[in-house]
Amino acid sequence: MCAYLRETGDFGYLKQRVPYVDHGEETVWRHLIRAVAFTRAHLGPHLLPRSGFSDWNDTLNVDHGSGRAESVWTAMQFCRAVLDLADLCRATSRPRLAERMSGLQATMAGVVNEHAWSGDWYLRSFDDDGLPIGAAGAPHHAIDLITQSWSILGGVAPRDRAERALAAADRILDTEFGLALLWPPYDGADARVGGTATLVPGAKENGGIFCHASAWSIAAAAACGRGDDAYRYYMQILPLARQDFERYGAEPYVYAQNVCGPAHPSFGLARNAWLTGTAAWAWYAFTQWILGMRPTYFGLRIAPALPSAWPGFSAHRVFRGTAYEITVTRGGPGSRATILVDGSPLEGDVVPLPPPGTPSITVEVVVA
């Protein structure tokens, strides 16, 4: 919802009334607020969101009826959601509610950092008995990819932990074909996690390269200024970058849901082509984080995370009816952007919305 509103500025949509699946209806705005209230009403023993049957990983079934199992990843996603809502509140003149949403994020981030830091990376979940999943030293699933990326996307990790989490994921999970979802994979049934352990080691959610999740690592690396890592992760999962078509086994013009991971005998083989959210997320990660063109409620942010080998790029971006002609050049090894808008220097990195009806503007960026 927030992504749609940042792109369009269609705040009137928040007033539309939408039914609930069971009974009654409320405005879109009230649906958003109720979603936050739902999560806050379903917290577990560590005050993290309860897992229920599963979270994004629908094979990770850690709640077996107790209602006590918790998802660290959902906590991080909650943090991202309330940060987005805080920005929306500021854009719609709700400053007190914006402050409250920011406070919810700070509280949940504090809980995650208190209970879910494993020493060099973030845990994935807590099971029915309150025992961690994704903890260093475990024989299976000692590290999980998505809590490392979402610790950054959710604004949870302090800078030192963000760097350590990304470095751990890169060191342990990265392969020539992308980042594995977890390591080491399960090698037989495990009642703690249900479906994940029923998969062949290295397949799909059991240590496979889940391309959808890899896109989050692209965005997280770019957010931390690691342009080379972000671009490397992007190229590893880009179908057109694969030259070993016999090994890849899927159409070279479509993302696969997953690629068999390093523990699988068919390492590098693409599975479930077309059945994936990867295409949208990879586009988002590349355009908004590597190229750095991110819509905001008040204008277009230009904050590239350039790979070191790139001298720059040019882009044509239509935003709110205006064509932005953007040229980015590298002036040094850093990532700080100096911006000219129609020849005039800009304070910060958000190009303000021009007057309605402006056909085009020119944006010149030097990164150094």
Image (cartoon, helix red, strand yellow):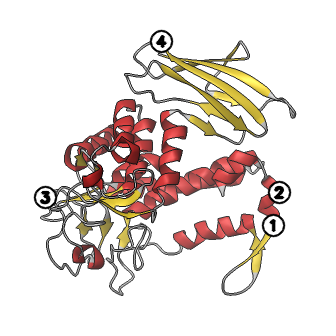
Q: Tell me the residue at 20%/71% (across/down).
A: 200
Q: Horizontally, is 165 left or right of 183 in the view?
A: right
CA distance separating discs 1 and 3: 50 Å
Mark 3 — residue?
137
Q: Earlier in the sequence, mark 4 or mark 3?
A: 3
Q: Tell me the residue at 79%/38% (across/down).
A: 321
| Residue 141 lies in quadrant | bottom left
The percent position of residue 165, horizontal first and vertical second, equals 30, 45
Circle 1 residues within 10 Å: few <14, some 14–19, many ≥20: few
Q: Tell me the residue at 51%/60% (across/down).
A: 78
Residue 347 in view (yes/no): yes
Say above or below: 233 vs 10: above
Under circle 1, the secondary element is: loop
Residue that protrudes farthest toward the right in the picture: 357
Q: Are marks 4 and 3 in contact (CB under 8 Å)?
A: no
Under circle 3, the secondary element is: loop
Of the two numbered discs 4 and 1 in the rendering, the one whose residue sits closer to the viewer = 4
Q: Nearer the viewer, residue 114 or 368?
A: 368
Q: Amino acid at mark 2?
A: Gly
Circle 2 residues within 10 Å: few <14, some 14–19, many ≥20: few
CA distance separating discs 4 and 1: 47 Å
Q: Are marks 1 and 2 in contact (CB under 8 Å)?
A: yes
| Residue 56 lies in quadrant | bottom left
Quadrant (top left/top right/bottom left/bottom right) for the N terminus: bottom right
Residue 117 in view (yes/no): no
Q: Amino acid at mark 4?
A: Gly
CA distance separating discs 3 and 2: 51 Å
Under circle 4, the secondary element is: loop
Mark 1 — residue?
16
Mark 4 — residue?
331
